[in-house]
Image (cartoon, rainbow, N blue to C red):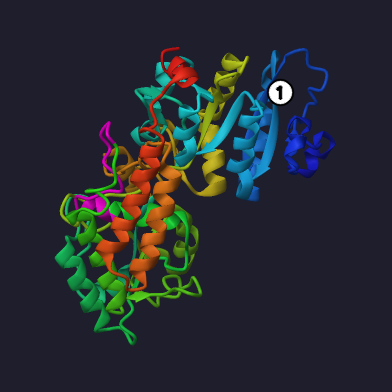
Amino acid sequence: MIARNARNLRIGDRLAPLAAVFLVLTACDNDNSDTTGSILEVWAHAGQESERSVLIDQVAQFNAREADVEVRLTLIPEGSYNAQVQAAAVAGGLPDLLELDGPFLYAYVWQGRLQPLDRLLPEGLRADLLPSIIEQGRYHDRLWAFGTFDSGLGLYADRVQLEQADIRIPDLNTPWDAAEFEDILERLATRDADGQVLDLKLNYAGEWYTYGFSPLIQSAGGGLIDRSDVARAEGVLDGPSSIGAMRRIQSWILRGRVDPNIDDAAFATRRVALALGGHWNYPRYSGRLGEDLLLLPLPDLGHGPKTGQGSWCWAVTADSTQPDGAARFLAFLLEPDQILAMTAANGAVPATRRAIARSPLYRPGGPLDLFVEQLDGGYAVPRPPTPAYPVITAEFQKAFDRIRSGGEVQAALQRAARVIDLEIEDNQGYPLVGRAREETIR
């Protein structure tokens, strides 16, 4: 698809001062170069090739359909995406429509860079979205962004190994509790040569720690931060519930029940019976285990099973002069055919119920319908909706590194909480003022 549109590829002149390479495509099979319509500037991250191809094709379809608006797509490398967009924001050079990594959304709202979507999208479209999509995009009681897909987090299991150890299969209504889960680890260990029976993806790093493990903290009654108006980490991240959850996780590691998974093959080779993982692991796991693959909820550590959520989302910039055109393109991306095309490319959870109903993987009875049940049923906890999130996740990741290496849990979490609270205090709690406040009442 990229080669087919190579004639429309050039360096983005609006971003040239940022000294980065961008792919700008007016992607159109029917060549709309002579269009008399308005140009809608759209920026997106250049993710995996399959996603890029789908998005480029979607732009081409939209441009062929619309006579009075033409999307001009700019793809920015994922690794530097947020930095490049922030630099453009400071320079006053944002496009009309912007793709954002979900956790960064709140900073853009606080900076007054975005305008609300709830007045632009028809109620019917919003009502079709999974509640997790709305939760991620809502801030100060307005909807600022939404994704066309969400993520799924669960516990993959090897049916054969569970049956051999006479272990019951849990579901969301009857999840394993903490004591049962730890007993299962020991029972599986007695049948395992090295006693390592659980993959926590410790070979991953960065955001995985926060995404993968904060649901276990929340299941224990803890959290990353107090989510009231007076947001603070002290007493929550370093509170008894969070400390207890992290001590459990540390004990699984220190007792030798967790495979370090250096080769990223612990579960796929059936070296372990259980693996914490996301929707992106399914193709590989199902290919290796077939009918023996199970998808289970995370254990209930006292306050019900929890899961992660969140992914890339779309937002209209505050200075856009084409909000209606942007809304039309967003409505197009939410059509079931478009969502299914994108989720077929990246394996993620479709964002709307209409698309889910047509998805072989995610519809009721499909092999990944647990992910939908979790996102639709209130089991998913969004990342803290605050501009401080980049600091929150960075400090939690440092604490997790110390804890997994045997560091004292309470001290590690207290250190993280102090840094997070200092960040929030330095910004006076991130009140919405000026342009940001104006946008909330637009």
Residue 91, image x, y percentages? 66, 29
Callout 1, which amino acid?
A: Ala
Residue 11, image x, y percentages? 80, 37
Q: Quadrant of the N terminus?
A: top right
Q: Secondary structure at mark 1?
A: helix
**Label 1 CA crowd tier, 10 Å (few <14, some 14–19, many 20+):** some
In screen coordinates, is 34 left or right of 142? right
Looking at the image, residue 54 lies above or below residue 441: below
Residue at x 58%, y 41% (from the top left corner): 82
**Where does the magenta region start and end?**
216-230
> What secondary structure characterizes most of the magenta part?
loop
Q: Which residue in the protein does label 1 denote? A: 64
Does residue 440 appear in this view?
yes
Looking at the image, residue 64 lies above or below residue 272: above
Q: Residue 414, located in which quarter of the rendered image?
A: bottom left
In screen coordinates, is 418 left or right of 33? left
The residue nearer to you, when weighing 16 against 57, is: 16
Q: Quadrant of the C terminus?
A: top left
Does residue 276 appear in this view?
no
Q: Residue 29, located in which quarter of the rendered image?
A: top right
In screen coordinates, is 114 left or right of 266? right
Magenta span has 219? Answer: yes
Magenta span has 16? Answer: no
The residue nearer to you, when weighing 296 against 85, is: 85
Residue at x 42%, y 68% (from the top left corner): 202
Residue 330, image x, y percentages? 54, 25
Residue 102, image x, y percentages? 47, 39
In screen coordinates, is 3 left or right of 409? right
